[in-house]
Image: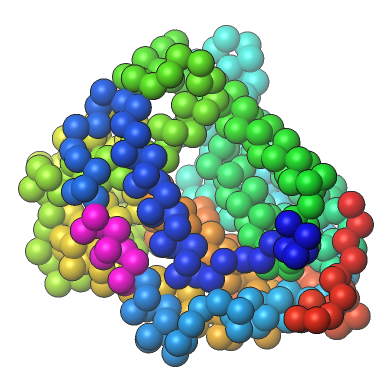
Amino acid sequence: MRRIRTLALPGYVSAVTCVWVGVSVLYGVRWSAYITEPVAALLPFVIVVVLGTVVGFTLLGGRLLSGRPDRLRLDRALSVGNRLTPLFRQVFWVWIAIAVAEIALEGTPPLVRSLLGQNSDYLQFGVTSIHGLLLAMACAIALIEQAVRLNQGRQPIGPYTLVIVFWMILIIGRKHLIILAIQLVLLLLARRVIRASFAHMIRWGAAILALVFLFGFLGDFRSSAGVGIKEKLAYSGPDWVPDAFVWFYSYLVTPIANWQNAYAHGYAGDAPFPWKAFSGLLPSAFEGSSQVDVEGGTAYSTAPWLLTSSFNISTGYIVPLVEAGLVGVFLFTVAISLFSALLLARAKDMAGGLSFIVSYQCAVLMIFSNNFGNLNTVFQIPILVLLGRWMIDSSRESVPHKLKGEAEPRYAP
């Protein structure tokens, strides 16, 4: 532990591989009576995803390895900028105005409805298309503030991020709370400011535990049927495991179980390329653009391969699988990995570096859903590319990146 002074961001390929292997191990625990397919049957899926990532990011992306050189490039880019410009504050206040207007139009936010004992369907809250734009703007604004504050040697959680977190709790935006948290962790790893000391690990461990219980708390509010998570999952693990951890387990394991069921029940398609995986990039205001259907008009959220209707996501690869089979999964993985490699190659400043952080996050969360094809999340990238560099003072008078043999960057605890 004394030799490991800071923790570094894993390479893109390494991160994707670890996520899929790790979740497969959790799947093998089989804490749900709904899981019927053997864990060994997941091997072809994991191989296809990892191989597609290697081909897209490493080979087509022009990289022999995606480790230390990529980390240094990203660290240099993220070190460019140590002040927020007036445009940043203007964009934030525009976001505030739209968010308040949406609440005025839609009425009582979902969390308040739940606290009052009223019916609260968080999926129905928000103005079509505008709500997705608000989510993407919120994540991008918070990410910029966090990166700039790190360069100032301050804690990354500032007033803008706190307002955004409060808004997401108010609308029960659990997915984007997790996205915010993951992007912050990725940013901290990229800037190498998480020290591997006992005190720091205790601090971050406590923060992760708090996030787990917040996740479970919001999950209970989002569950309107009055049935506990263990009953919903047909849980068969140890009784002493808290519901908050079962929420995490279920959200990690059931997507790949549903995805595997789709393949096992013959729903793999044979199209040449999974174009429908990008259909979510059109605003939902365009009729039919946000809803891709399977045979017989059955929506993916109520598809016949689901373990149970309580868990209706099937990883971000379900559309490529149903449209083009395992070949489609491979081609789609190659495409998104190449896109990530190009973002990193063009990262010259903080905006470019943060764009890659978003892409990295999307790749990690493919275990849940296709954020590359979801405007609510991936629209952070055009916001950062088009506006980011004018929202950040590009002065290089910031915390220097740490090279081998150099002193560590200062970070105010």
- In the picture shown, does residue 235 fall above or below 378? above
Residue furthest toward the front?
2
Closer to us: 200 or 369: 200
Residue 45 shown in magenta: yes
- Splitting the image into 4 quarters, where does residue 412 fall? bottom right
| Highlighted range, magenta | 43-52
Q: Residue at x 13, y 54 (%)?
A: 268
Q: Is residue 288 left or right of residue 196?
A: left
Which residue sits at x=45%, y=87%?
Answer: 64
Does residue 43 lie above or below 247 as drawn? below
Is 75 left or right of 358, judged from the image as shown? right
Q: Quadrant of residue 265?
A: top left
Q: Estimate the x, y position of residue 23 in percent, counting from the top left.
A: 40, 46
In this view of the protein, can residue 169 be seen by the observer? no
Of the pair 212 and 148, the residue shown nearer to us = 212
The reply to whether residue 358 is visible in this rendering is yes
Name the residue at 8% across, 48% down.
266
